[in-house]
Image: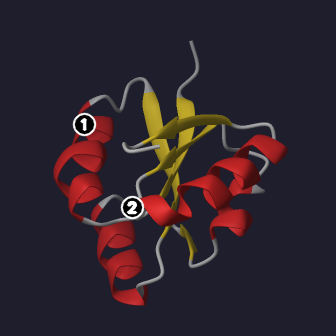
Amino acid sequence: MPKLKIGIIGLGEVAQIIHLPVLESLSDKFEITAVCDISPKLLEVAGDRYNVSNRYTNAAELASLSELDAVLVCNSDEYHADCVIAAVQNKKHVLIEKPM
């Protein structure tokens, strides 16, 4: 089975402590293909740490990547709807951090 290519929107505490390390530990099943955050510094740190070259400050741009299988939405909950809609419109599977 090929690895699922995941894009992550929001690189805050929950992504850093839970999602990124778990995806890395399951690297035989998942590939972190793209990351997105409004903070250029977080993009640099997470991108370098997880060897991700696809870095975005715009969630809709990340969601439009053809190679992604799924998008994990971890940003602030008031932005969840816009990110989910962008991902679904681009025919991506969506995982969303609570609250939805």
Horizontal side of residue 94 vs 89, given as left or right: left
Q: Position of residue 89 (x, y in %)?
A: 83, 46
Q: Position of residue 68 (x, y in %)?
A: 67, 43
Disc 2 marks a residue whose amino acid type is: Asn
Residue furthest to the top:
1
Q: Residue at x 33, y 78 (%)?
A: 42
Which mark, by number, is residue 22? 1
Q: Residues within 10 Å of mark 1 (few under 14, many from 20)?
A: few
Which mark, by number, is residue 86? none
Q: What element does badge 1 sit on?
A: helix
> Depth check: 96 or 1 in front?
96
Q: Mark 1 or mark 2: which is in front?
A: 1
> Depth check: 99 or 96 in front?
99
Image quadrant in which the N terminus is located: top right
Disc 1 marks a residue whose amino acid type is: Val
Distance Cα–Cα, label 1 vs label 2: 15 Å
Residue labelled with disc 2: 51
Q: Residue at x 29, y 66 (%)?
A: 12
Q: Is residue 88 above or below residue 61?
A: above
The answer to whether residue 90 of the structure is visible from this angle is no
Q: What element does badge 2 sit on?
A: loop
Quadrant of the rendered image containing residue 63: bottom right
Q: Earlier in the sequence, mark 1 or mark 2?
A: 1
